[in-house]
Image (cartoon, rainbow, N blue to C red):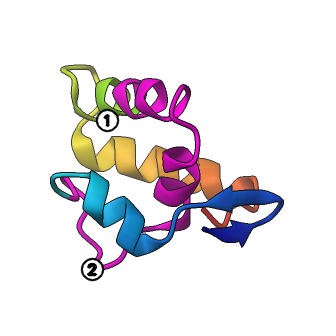
Amino acid sequence: MTEIAWVDTPTEEQVNAERPSAGPYDFGFVPAMGRLLAAHPRIGPSFFALFGEIMFAPGALSRRERELVAGIAAVTQDCFY
């Protein structure tokens, strides 16, 4: 485990051992947000399911538009995850 903020998070190797694939976002590393969610076995899977619905389910916005909204929301909150 490593520490991001005050939360002990699994290492990149631990996350990779437990997940079958990186899904649609393969950056060549495990982002901090993914490690943070992996540290919470009760909350993480629910968050990933919600994220999947928001980003990939049919809706009024295109995939590009959804990514743009997510990026702008993260920047405006000074979110480094």
Task: Using the image as rendered, state which of residue 61 and residue 49 is in the foreground.
Answer: 49
Q: Residue at x 49, y 71 (%)?
A: 11
Q: Residue at x 46, y 55 (%)?
A: 34
Q: Classify mark 1: helix, strand or loop.
A: helix
Amino acid type at image mark 2: Gly
In the rendered image, residue 4, in percent from the top left (x then y), is placed at 72, 67
In the rendered image, residue 38, in percent from the top left (x then y), is placed at 49, 48
Residue 55 numbered mark, or none: 1
Please give the range of residues in magenta.
22-50
In the rendered image, residue 27, in percent from the top left (x then y), is placed at 29, 74
Mark 1–mark 2 distance (CA, rounded to whole Å): 20 Å
Amino acid type at image mark 1: Met
Q: Quadrant of residue 52?
A: top left
Task: Using the image as rendered, state which of residue 43 and residue 81 is in the foreground.
Answer: 43
Q: Residue at x 61, y 60 (%)?
A: 9
Q: Give the mark nearer the N terminus: 1 vs 2.
A: 2
* Residue 46 among those drawn in magenta: yes
Task: Using the image as rendered, state which of residue 21 and residue 11 is in the foreground.
Answer: 11
**Figure check: 72 above or below 16:** above
Q: Label 2 neighbourhood size at 10 Å, few (<14), some (14-19), many (20+)?
A: few
Name the outermost residue toward the right.
6
In the rendered image, which quarter contains the N terminus? bottom right
Residue 28 numbered mark, or none: 2
Q: Is residue 6 left or right of residue 81?
A: right
Name the outermost residue toward the bottom.
28
